[in-house]
Amino acid sequence: MMSKEFFEIQKILKSKVDKEVKVSAKKFVPTAKKIYGVKALELNKLAVKYKIGGFKLAEELWKSGAFEEKLLATKILGKVCKKDSDLTLKLIKKFSKDISDWAVCDTLATQGIRGIIKIKQKEILQIAKKLINSKNFWKRRFAIVLLINFVKDKNLKKEIEKIVKTVENDKEYYVKKAVDWIKRKMK
């Protein structure tokens, strides 16, 4: 059964629909599913207000499948990740199986784990190493974006380069874009 907060959020999202935002989201995130059309600023406000719902609420929002609900799930996860870094990693792995657009992918790989990247560096690198070889191109992109969290660490440069090399010639558009992104960050 879904929480009271989940239904409150859905009601708020429906009340904040903006047709121009929906058109824009469909244009810039063409693979996104079930778009409400709610501004990112509103999602950020909801993440702050509803972070109290924690991991359970993040899972509920993720399962619902709507674009903004998944984005909100990742933002809430990022706000509570320090409370249980192991559960955060478990959810990251679970959520990574169900990514269908670059915006959710990148938000999950950055904002969703930002609070634990230092304490769970080894584990996050392991996730990236595993996903980089996936048949699913969203998982490969997710792996690269996870690595972006570590590009400033000079001690990891060779390891990151080695992992990225495995997808350097990837044919998938979204993977190629992530490879270009990380290479620019590593300069």
Image (tube, helix red, strand yellow):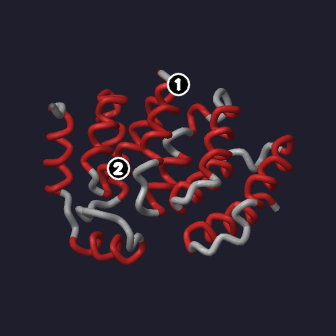
Residue 140 makes an appearance in the image: yes
Position above or below: 186 against 117: below
Is residue 95 found left or right of 175 in the rendered image? Answer: left
Residue at image point 68% right, 49% down: 147
Residue at the extreme front of the image, as rendered: 135
The answer to which of marks 2 and 1 sits earlier in the sequence is 2
Q: Which residue is mark 1?
A: 86
Q: Amino acid at mark 1?
A: Asp
Mark 1 secondary-structure assignment: helix
**Which label lies toward us, 2 or 1?**
1
Q: Name the image quarter holding residue 126.
A: top right
Q: Dot 1 surroundings within 10 Å: few (below 14), some, or many (20 or more)?
A: some
> Which residue is disc 2 drawn over?
70
Q: Position of residue 50 (x, y in %)?
A: 29, 35
Residue at the image position 41 percent from the left and 70 percent from the top: 29
The residue shown at (60%, 66%) is 175
Instruction: Tell me the amino acid under the disc marked 2.
Output: Lys
> Residue 47 in the image: x percent, y percent?
35, 41
User: Residue most toward the top?
Assistant: 83
Q: Residue at x 54, y 48 (%)?
A: 109
For mark 2, does the 10 Å Cα neighbourhood hold few (<14), some (14 to 19), or many (20 or more) residues?
Answer: many
Front one among 171 and 176: 171
Spatial CA distance of label 2 from label 1 is 20 Å
Q: Position of residue 100 (x, y in %)?
A: 41, 60
Q: Is residue 163 left or right of residue 140?
A: right
Secondary structure beneath dot 2 equals helix
Please state if 150 lies on the left or on the right of 175 as rendered.
right
